[in-house]
């Protein structure tokens, strides 16, 4: 397996290094072509995310140094990069890619987004003619392993982020989201993730309230929701079945009085409220209302810890699946490595067959004796086919080369003959 991976990730490099060697969409085509045109680089895929930049290659071993130099030069990096680079070869490279695809090498154990990012990187390389048959087999097997891990383990079923945990708790209150309304307060990264999870679960309506209305509008537009300023929060609360808040406000944005009025207008229909903010966005007294299920970030931590423990247990099973699939891939590659030899043997056999057949046909034409021609054909063809192997075996005998002689017995099935006679 002439595979090679060169790069950095969150395990080997701090963010100030990672952010300086990102290959964004504007430079990725040039980077693929330049690195792919280096002597000895046969195929290449560049994976570039916020947590990793890795070049996956099929290359000749002497090309490794040139690829490292190219990466330095392309980004104009200093010597700090060299300290952060990692390299993986052959089987170790395949194992690394499989683990990445399964989310076992991610900041959040088992996160599924990386599989999609790998697929995007592979498709991009295909579009530029850089992913040939070897990397296609490698990446397709990686995607297959990732699917098997997702199907056969629980690595992706437990919440391990605040956003995911908040939505998971909401699902314990409302089994279906399609007939419910969610109100999100804030428009930062956490709320964006919450919106993404809610949208993925088919939320009926989505409101996003934020101090910056343009930011709220941009986020709401992405998920088919509605934007509103913070001043409209009290009037919107009665419509919300799910409230999730995460802002940097120093004072509560949702008071107990606001919630009390909302419950009266809702005729006591329950509300799930999750306050992720520190300091809190929802007054603590709201927890005293019978029809409000209020959770704070501390409550979520227990869900997250349980999720991490569950994922760690599932990761052990995922590692076993990866090792099994790695062996399957390794065996498949070995078979493919033998294909050129098999073709050469068959090609040589075909040439010898044609040569001896023409000689036998001339003998038959001259003598008219079919039996003699057939005997000549069989004897000559056998001698020509076995001449080179016999010559090499005599040499092996003279040199006491046991490996060659044992291989010959295995190759020609002589061990089976010995077993049958005994």
Image (cartoon, rainbow, N blue to C red):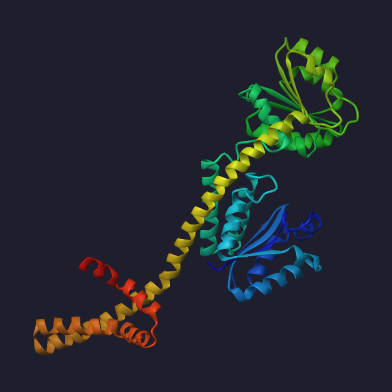
Residue 121, how many percent across, how many down?
63, 56
Residue placed most toward the observer, 327 or 133: 327
Residue 252, how many percent across, how many down?
87, 25
Q: Quadrant of residue 288?
A: top right
Identity of the residue drawn at 27% across and 67% down: 416
User: Where's the C terminus, which quadrant?
Assistant: bottom left
Direction from residue 395 to residue 371 in the image, left or right: left
Identity of the residue drawn at 85% across and 27% down: 230
Identity of the residue drawn at 91% across and 30% down: 250
Q: Is residue 204 above or below residue 128?
A: above
Residue 383, how many percent across, how many down?
25, 84
Q: Quadrant of residue 162?
A: top right
| Residue 224 visible to an observer of this rendering | no
Residue placed most toward the observer, 227 or 135: 135
Q: Is residue 40 above or below residue 4?
A: below
Identity of the residue drawn at 69% across and 65% down: 31
Residue placed most toward the observer, 4 or 25: 4
Q: Is residue 215 above or below residue 46?
A: above
């Amino acid at each position: 397996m002439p595979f090679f991976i060169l790069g950095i990730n969150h395990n080997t490099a701090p963010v100030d290094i990672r952010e300086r060697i990102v290959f964004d969409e504007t430079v990725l085509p040039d980077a693929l072509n330049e690195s792919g045109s280096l002597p000895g680089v046969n195929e290449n895929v560049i994976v570039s995310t916020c947590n990793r930049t890795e070049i996956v290659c099929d290359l000749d071993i002497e090309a490794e140094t040139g690829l490292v130099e190219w990466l330095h030069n392309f980004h104009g990096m200093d010597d700090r990069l060299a300290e952060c680079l990692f390299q993986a070869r052959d089987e170790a490279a395949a194992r690394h890619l499989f683990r990445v695809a399964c989310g076992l090498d991610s900041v959040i154990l088992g996160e599924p987004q990386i599989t999609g990012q790998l697929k995007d990187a592979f498709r991009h390389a295909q579009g530029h003619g850089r992913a040939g048959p070897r990397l296609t087999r490698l990446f397709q097997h990686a995607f297959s392993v990732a699917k098997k891990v997702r199907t056969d383990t629980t690595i992706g079923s437990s919440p391990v982020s605040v956003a995911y945990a908040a939505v998971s708790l909401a699902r314990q209150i409302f089994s279906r989201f399609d007939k419910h309304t969610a109100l999100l307060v804030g428009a930062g990264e956490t709320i964006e993730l919450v919106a993404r999870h809610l949208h993925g679960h088919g939320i009926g309506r989505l409101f996003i309230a934020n101090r910056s209305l343009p930011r709220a509008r941009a986020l709401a537009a992405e998920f088919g929701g509605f934007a509103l300023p913070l001043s409209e929060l009290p009037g919107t609360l009665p419509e919300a079945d799910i409230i999730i808040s995460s802002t940097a406000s120093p004072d509560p944005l949702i008071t107990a009085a606001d919630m009390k009025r909302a419950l009266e207008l809702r005729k006591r229909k329950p509300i799930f409220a999750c306050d992720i903010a520190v300091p809190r966005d929802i007054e603590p007294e709201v927890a005293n209302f019978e029809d409000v299920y209020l959770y704070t970030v501390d409550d979520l931590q227990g869900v997250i810890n349980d999720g991490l423990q569950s994922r760690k247990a599932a990761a052990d099973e995922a590692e076993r699946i990866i090792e099994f699939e790695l062996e399957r891939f390794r065996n498949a590659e070995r078979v493919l490595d033998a294909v050129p030899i098999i073709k050469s043997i068959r090609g040589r056999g075909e040439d010898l067959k044609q040569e001896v057949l023409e000689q036998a046909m001339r003998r038959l034409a001259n003598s008219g004796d079919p039996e003699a021609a057939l005997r000549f054909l069989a004897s000559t063809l056998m001698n020509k086919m076995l001449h080179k192997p016999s010559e090499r075996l005599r040499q092996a005998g003279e040199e006491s080369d046991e490996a060659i002689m044992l291989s010959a017995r295995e190759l020609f099935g002589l061990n089976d003959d010995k077993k049958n006679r005994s």
